[in-house]
Image: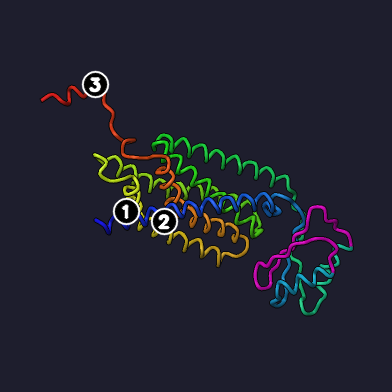
């Protein structure tokens, strides 16, 4: 009995420490977003995009330094492979002779010997429309989630799941802001996938907590013990599901190339923090709000109780 009590106490302490850590990370993410913002890609900002290849492998830093000597404005150079590169320029960049000097330089240099594949201007109007539609879709998904949770769970468990969901989205956005990873349409799509994944984890734990509270009688076990038992009974399933999904996302991250890198980073982070929040927030916050077996007691009126008491 003492060993069980100590294990339950340690589990409860770990859950509360995790919730404190989550609170600190959320605050840090909000501060980072307020100070640095998101690094929006050309999908949203518009601008000039030039793709070119080199005849041999060139280090990204060396190529960036070489282009900077022949470019008058700001630009962003990314590697799509060992010899495939993309150069992005702001919408305000003018395609005058001076700003095209870098193309001549990389194509005429014998060590680089680049070949321009395409050079085009990408307008931001389509990106703005898609961004608005994506945000609207995310808002609609959040509203649908709240309605679903309100119907399925007692309000404390429902609130815990919603807070866990918001926590996951904020941490993913905070990471993108901190590292200034490009935020494009594929990353926006990954946020919708994170909403579904985070909700799934929280519902699994919440369902088990509700089941154990419903069968609890005479308050033999404390709410903390019941929640710990619910987490233990679902932990193996959660870890297996998260592990196999992370392996798939990691493969996309490592093998799919730069175009899907932001998408994979967002999903990978969302799965990790979603698994964490389903334990430390979705299951712990209801306990702080006073969740107990009494919330699931079946209430009967006086007439029904009289019939039940009759021999």
Q: Which residues are magenta?
A: 70-97
Label 2: state its secondary structure: helix
* CB atoms of marks 1 and 3 within 8 Å: no
Image coords of residue 206 (percent x, y): 38, 45
Could one spot residue 150 in this view of the protein? Answer: yes
Local crowd size for mark 3, using a 10 Å CA cut-off: few (<14), some (14–19), many (≥20): few
Label 1 sits on residue: 233
30 is higher (above) or lower (below) than 97 = above
The quarter of the rendered structure image containing the C terminus is top left
Label 3: state its secondary structure: helix
Q: Find the distance from the CA under tag 2 to the CA under tag 3.
A: 44 Å
Label 1: state its secondary structure: helix
Residue 14, numbered circle? 2
Image coords of residue 307 (percent x, y): 17, 23
Q: Find the distance from the CA under tag 1 to the CA under tag 3.
A: 38 Å
212 is higher (above) or lower (below) than 117 = above
Of 37 and 92, which appears nearest the observer? 37
Residue furthest to the bottom in view is 111
Label 3 sits on residue: 302
Local crowd size for mark 1, using a 10 Å CA cut-off: few (<14), some (14–19), many (≥20): some
Image coords of residue 91 (percent x, y): 79, 53
Relative to 154, 165 lies left or right: right
């Amino acid at each position: 009995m003492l060993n069980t009590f100590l294990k339950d106490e340690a589990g409860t302490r770990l859950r509360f420490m995790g919730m404190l850590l989550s609170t600190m990370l959320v605050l840090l993410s909000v501060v980072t977003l307020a100070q640095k913002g998101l690094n929006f890609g050309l999908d949203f900002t518009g601008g000039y995009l030039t793709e070119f290849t080199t005849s041999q492998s060139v280090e990204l830093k060396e190529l960036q330094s070489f282009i900077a000597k022949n470019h008058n404005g700001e630009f962003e150079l990314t590697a799509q492979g060992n010899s495939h590169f993309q150069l992005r320029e702001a919408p305000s960049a003018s395609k005058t002779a001076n700003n095209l000097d870098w193309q001549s330089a990389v194509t005429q240099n014998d060590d680089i010997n680049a070949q321009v594949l395409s050079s085009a201007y990408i307008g931001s109007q389509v990106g703005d429309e898609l961004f608005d539609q994506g945000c609207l879709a995310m808002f609609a998904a959040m509203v649908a989630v709240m309605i679903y949770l309100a119907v399925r769970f007692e309000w404390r468990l429902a609130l815990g799941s919603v807070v866990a969901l918001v926590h996951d989205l904020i941490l993913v956005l905070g990471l993108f802001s901190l590292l200034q990873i490009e935020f494009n349409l594929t990353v926006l799509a990954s946020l919708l996938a994170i909403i579904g994944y985070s909700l799934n984890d929280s519902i699994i734990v919440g369902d088990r907590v509700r089941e154990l509270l419903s069968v609890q009688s005479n308050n033999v076990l404390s709410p903390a013990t019941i929640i710990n038992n619910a987490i233990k009974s679902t932990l193996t399933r959660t870890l297996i599901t998260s592990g196999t999904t992370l392996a798939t996302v990691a493969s996309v991250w490592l093998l799919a190339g730069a175009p899907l890198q932001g998408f994979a980073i967002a999903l990978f982070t969302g799965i990790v923090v979603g698994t964490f929040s389903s334990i430390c927030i979705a299951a712990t916050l209801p306990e702080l709000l006073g969740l107990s077996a009494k919330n699931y007691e079946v209430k009967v009126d006086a007439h029904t109780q009289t019939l039940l008491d009759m021999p």
